[in-house]
Image (spheres, rainbow, N blue to C red):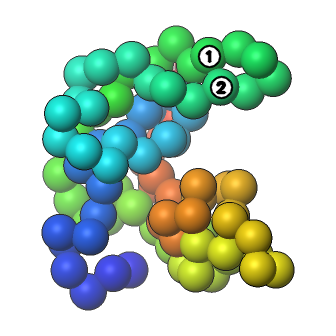
């Protein structure tokens, strides 16, 4: 977990877990696309460090084999809350 809460994303999409890196994104439509289809969720604010966990794929580095981690989008963290359909 990062030492500073200011390093944490402002929010996440509860449908797919995509982080919202800027406060202005809260309440807007998720931008994630999978298989050519856009996620239908909206970004929500995350309020606690416990809303995030270290990415198990890259162990928090944000990179796997010199490449951007696809599981956490290079953040090194993943949204820890349950995801909703």
User: Which residue occupies the foreground of this view, 56 or 9?
Assistant: 9
Q: Is residue 47 left or right of residue 65?
A: left
The alpha-carbon separation of the residues under discs 2 and 1 comes to 4 Å
Q: Residue at x 46, y 19 (%)?
A: 41
How many residues crowd around disc 2 within 10 Å: few (fewer than 14), some, or many (20 or more)? few
How many residues crowd around disc 1 within 10 Å: few (fewer than 14), some, or many (20 or more)? few
Report which quarter residue 28 is drawn in.
Answer: top left
Q: Is residue 19 left or right of residue 9?
A: right
Inspect this view and state whether residue 28 appears.
yes
Q: Is residue 64 left or right of residue 59?
A: right
Report which quarter residue 65 is drawn in.
Answer: bottom right
Secondary element at tag 2:
strand
Q: Which residue is mark 1?
A: 38
Query: Most extreme residue toward the bottom, as rendered?
Result: 3
Q: Is residue 66 left or right of residue 44?
A: right
As drawn, 52 above or below 20: below
Secondary element at tag 1:
strand
Q: Position of residue 37 (x, y in %)?
A: 71, 14
Q: Residue at x 24, y 22 (%)?
A: 27
Q: Which residue is mark 2?
A: 33
Q: Position of residue 17 (x, y in %)?
A: 51, 41
Q: Residue at x 35, y 42 (%)?
A: 20
User: Which residue occupies the foreground of this view, 84 or 64?
Assistant: 64
Q: Counting residues from the N terminus, which is met first, the one under dot 2 or under dot 1?
A: 2
Q: Residue at x 38, y 80 (%)?
A: 1
Label 2–label 1 contact, CB within 8 A: yes
Query: Most extreme residue toward the front, as rendered?
Result: 66
């Amino acid at each position: 977990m990062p030492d500073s809460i200011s390093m944490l994303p402002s929010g996440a999409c509860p449908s797919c877990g995509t982080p919202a890196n800027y406060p202005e994104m809260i309440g807007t439509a998720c931008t994630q696309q999978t298989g050519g289809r856009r996620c239908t969720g909206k970004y929500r604010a995350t309020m606690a460090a416990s809303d995030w966990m270290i990415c198990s794929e890259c162990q928090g580095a944000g990179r796997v084999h010199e490449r951007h981690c696809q599981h956490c989008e290079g953040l090194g963290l993943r949204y820890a809350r349950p995801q909703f359909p």
